[in-house]
Amino acid sequence: MIRRFNYTKRKVIRRDQVAVQLVTQPSGPASFNATIRLDGVTLPADARLYLEAHYKSSYMRFGFGTVGAIQPPAERVLNEIDRGSTVLFRLKAVDESGTHGRILAELDDIVADESGGAEADRYCILPVRFTELGQEIWRINFDEGPRPILEVNRFEGVENFVKSDPLFASLVFPAAVREILTHVLVVRAEEADVDGDGWPSLWMKFASRFHAEPPPDVEESDVQARLDWVDDVVRAFCQTQTFRDRLVAARKEDTA
Amino acid sequence: MAEIRRLTEQGTEAFRAYLGELRAGKPLAPPTDLLVGAVTSMPLTTRVNIERDVFTTRLEAAQYLARILGDVDRGQVDHNPGLWNWLSLFYFDRLCPPAPDGTRRPGRDYRYILPPIDDPEHFRHYYRHLLAGAYTVHRLHPGKAGVLLCGTVDKFDDFNEQLASRQEFVSNPGIIEAADVLYFDASSRKPKRGAASNKRRPGTLRRFIDVIQQFDLTYDLYSLTGRQIVDLLPEEFARWAQR
């Protein structure tokens, strides 16, 4: 089983309870709209809500009233956030009745929707970034941002190559899945806290769809058992996606 | 007095090649012709004049640059590697002073050359650029962050590596103020001795990072002042706050 730890006793805010839409301008900084629904989350009505926007060293914090009276601020311009970058948000419910504000609930890694609502309910566990990688074609970046990013080198037509070419899908995605799962279970070797909504948990949930057994317990299993589990997941993932068949068919078309 | 420009890609690569030659032991003077060459540099959209020999410390550099770049659109400053690369070359004698025999020992390229923002290296190294890093810290914490800005401009110390590399630390005024309370000696304008020990001795910088990361799970640290954060810290930090 995926083990559930919640040492902080924080309440859980589900990802579908918060939606942020970015409003970009032709010139000048972007602003945002946010919808927050906390039904089903047991929190004091007077707990303060804060939505924090951040990227790199830039950070802005917006008060959204209280749990009992959610009130977006009038000013929601992201003028202190670095331009030209992906803005991430986190929502905090804070108990300010004592000397030091205590976090009662938090949802991190909220990606603002820039599609006008079409993508608002989707959360991508592996965003793709096209960037300069020298002669390297792709890699997984674990260092930047709160979840892994699939970085792909720039060249003409690369967007379509990634999006729809069976060659890319069949060679890259299984390797990417293997690398990320190995990172979670072996390199980080941390239990996935599914209550926390963090990226390792979301990846474990994704991987569990391809395996009858839950991920091995990190504390009680050896490394080989975890690697074997990852192998099984990748094999089943490839089976489901019929990568070999799609690759062979595409090659036949190319040579016809 | 000179007019600030920005290095083009070609100018930046020539600067990078120069750094490589220095590392190979060649006692070369900085290629200042790149600063004004039509192919290697371009003017800014806003005219800004700049002087040499006006700062020694990171704080003085950040204050000076913040002042002279005050009228330039922020987007043209923050995400303009060509500007920061030009400034690095302009001030190269400060950022990488020559030894008496004329040789120089430059640091890694990212100390002087800022990777473009869409380059994966940018996120890893932007705070390590000797001028852009100091400027960013000063902009985030004007009049504060003594422990991050007190060093000479050619040095990048462990306080900067440990604090500026962590987004949740460097963007939080309370945490930076707490670091000053604990580790900055205002009378000597230097970090307190032994504070940056890499052995996790009680109350030192690395312990501060460990404890703050634990607090971050419980407390809303962005709402706290530096003094409030210091008051929350365990006893091991008391002697640093009192020194």
Image (tube, coloured by chain):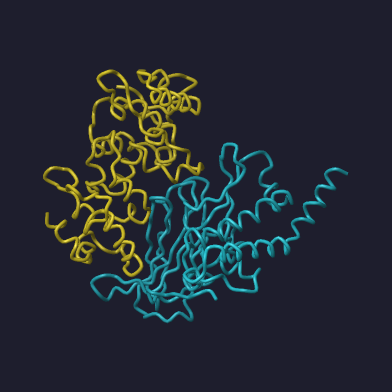
Residue A113 position (above or below residue A68) = above
Residue B54 position (above or below residue B222) = above
Left or right of residue A238, residue B158 in this image? left
Q: Colour of chain A?
A: cyan
- Residue B89 vs residue B64, the one in the foreground: B89
Quadrant location of the N terminus of chain B?
A: top left
Who's the residue at 43% across and 67% down the image? A91
Residue A240 position (above or below residue B109) = below
Quadrant location of the C terminus of chain B?
A: bottom left
Q: Residue A102: give x, y in percent of width and height.
A: 31, 72
- Residue B170 vs residue A77, the one in the foreground: B170
Who's the residue at 65% across and 61% down the image? A234
Q: Residue A30: give x, y in percent of width and height.
A: 48, 52
Residue A212 position (above or below residue B32) = below
Left or right of residue B184, residue B217 in this image? right
Q: Colour of chain B?
A: yellow
Who's the residue at 52% across and 61% down the image? A21
**In this figure, what is the number of numbered marks?**
0
Q: Residue A27: give x, y in percent of width and height.
A: 49, 45
Q: Residue B161: give x, y in percent of width and height.
A: 33, 46
Left or right of residue A39, residue A235 in this image? right
Q: Quadrant of residue B181?
A: bottom left
